[in-house]
Image (cartoon, rainbow, N blue to C red):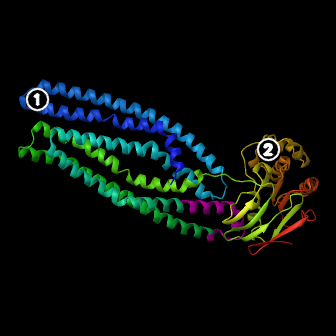
Amino acid sequence: MKKPERKIFRRGLRKSALVGFLARLSSLPGAFAAAEVIALAAQAARDGDVWRVVYLGLALVAVLAVCHGVTAAFETFGARLAARETNALRQRAYGAMLGRPLNIDHGTAREKLNDDLNACCGYYSEVLPGVAASAISAAVCFCWLLWRVPGIAWVYLGMAVLLTVPSVIMKNSFRRVYGDCREIEAELTNYIFTGYDGFGDLKLFGLGKKWIEGLRRIHRNYVRIGSKSELFAGVHDAANTTVATVLKYGAYAVAGVFVLWGNAGVGAALASAALAGSFFAAVNGAVERLPSIARTGRAFERIAPWFEEWKEEFSPVLAVNGATVDGVLNNISLRPDPEGITAITGANGSGKSTLLGLLAGLIVPASGRVERPSPEDVAYLPQTEPELGIPAGELLSLLPGAEDLARRFELSSQVLATDVAELSGGERKKVFLSLVFAKKAKYLFLDEPANSLDQKGISVLRELIKERGRGIVFVCHGDALSGLEDRVLRVENGEVRWA
């Protein structure tokens, strides 16, 4: 099975992965130098050669200083390179996400764009280089031990197997808990966004306490899942630390036993015990990343749909064939007239905005098919306009003719100099209506375009619809736009029919 997302990340982070790999290997010469110097120093001490011991100690300090300096240089360069490559990959991931239908909720988008994306980047820039360097270091250390004291080497290898037990046992638990954490955090984010967007209604109808109760319920689940994640992490770290400590001091005990049994000299035994720390650390460095590998596997599964081959086919004619949006619309089929004006009506919550989003290409049906024109032929006005931190006049200057339409709405120069986010609802609506009509797209999809408009604004909107006279589908409550439509679509009980 092809996994294009992994190939993209692997190629994008290959340089920082190589530097990270070299950074981790650069400390290996220091470990061997320490082992050999300890063996020589032990022999010099037995011979009573104090100055030789001093010289060997100073030489070891110099070697270790050089190794640490090289490691620090590699790590610094690797960190900068990883940051640059990660940012480039983020841009590509954003483009991949935005290139597909935007049917993802706020919470899920946040988790994928933060935790999942960071986990995937870290997998190739940190986890894999760490595993590879640790595996090579462990193999080289074992070969050295096998060469110097074979018996001790095999005992140390058996002891190292103990380090793998906690990570192997808990790998699947980390994978499962990672997915649970992302889902509950997405649910919490979505709930908070809902409360933020509906703050006025919650206050007006006295539903604040009810909303807080719902927040507490989600938060209890959040704490429960988070506590489980922390518990697993704590148990895993404690087990690893305990085993590593036992092995660290057990290595000297094993070396001592071999000396007492006459199976190894003091120098060789001390050298093997000194190198055992690096050997166990290398083994631990490989196996302790198993939980990260498990979590990353789940992260790749979550973002994989962004990178799957996707080629949307466009049609010159807008048509819906047996489309279903779960819980809202059921098996609907229709073909709006590109030469006419269509009004969508229905009770609150019936699915009018969902139908409009389906026609505009913002919602993907669970089943069925929607034939739609290319994005260049579509202009969409949402029910709530984005609160952008850009002056209204600067935004309008992006489309020829938009500023002329804004003047028809009587937007003053003061309004045009103000950031869109700071405008009133009516002023913001006029700005985006000017943009939508200036685009001159084949289809205009307008969701509650008369909302927040004063009488002058409604009058201008009606004029613009009449002047265009075709390819408009709008949702509207009340009589603000009545009489402009050629046909009416009625949404009721999940069904859509021509009125």
Q: At which x and y percent is residue 168? A: 34, 57
Queried whether the magenta region covers residue 199, the answer comes back as yes
Q: Quadrant of residue 491?
A: bottom right
Q: At which x and y percent is residue 433? A: 83, 52
Q: Residue visible at 45% across and 47% down?
A: 123
Q: Secondary structure at mark 2?
A: helix
Q: Secondary structure at mark 1?
A: helix
Q: Quadrant of residue 89?
A: top right
Kindly check if marks 2 and 1 are in contact, taking CB atoms under 8 A apart as contact. Answer: no
Magenta segment, which residues? 185-210
Q: At which x and y percent is residue 162? A: 25, 55
Residue 424 in view here: no
Read off the residue under disc 1.
Answer: 44
Q: Residue visible at 28% across and 33% down?
A: 29
451 or 271, nearer to the observer:
271
249 on left or right of 187:
left
Residue situated furthest front in the rendering? 1
320 on left or right of 256:
right
Q: Earlier in the sequence, mark 2 or mark 1?
A: 1
Q: Residue visible at 76% across and 57% down?
A: 372
Give the crowd class for mark 1: few <14, some 14-19, many >=20 residues within 10 Å. Answer: some
Residue situated furthest bottom in the rendering? 493
Q: Residue 57 got which mark?
A: none
Q: Mostly what secondary structure, the magenta segment?
A: helix
Taking 28 as reference, is 160 above or below it?
A: below
Three-letter amino acid code at disc 1? Ala
320 or 82, nearer to the observer:
320
Read off the residue under disc 2.
Answer: 392
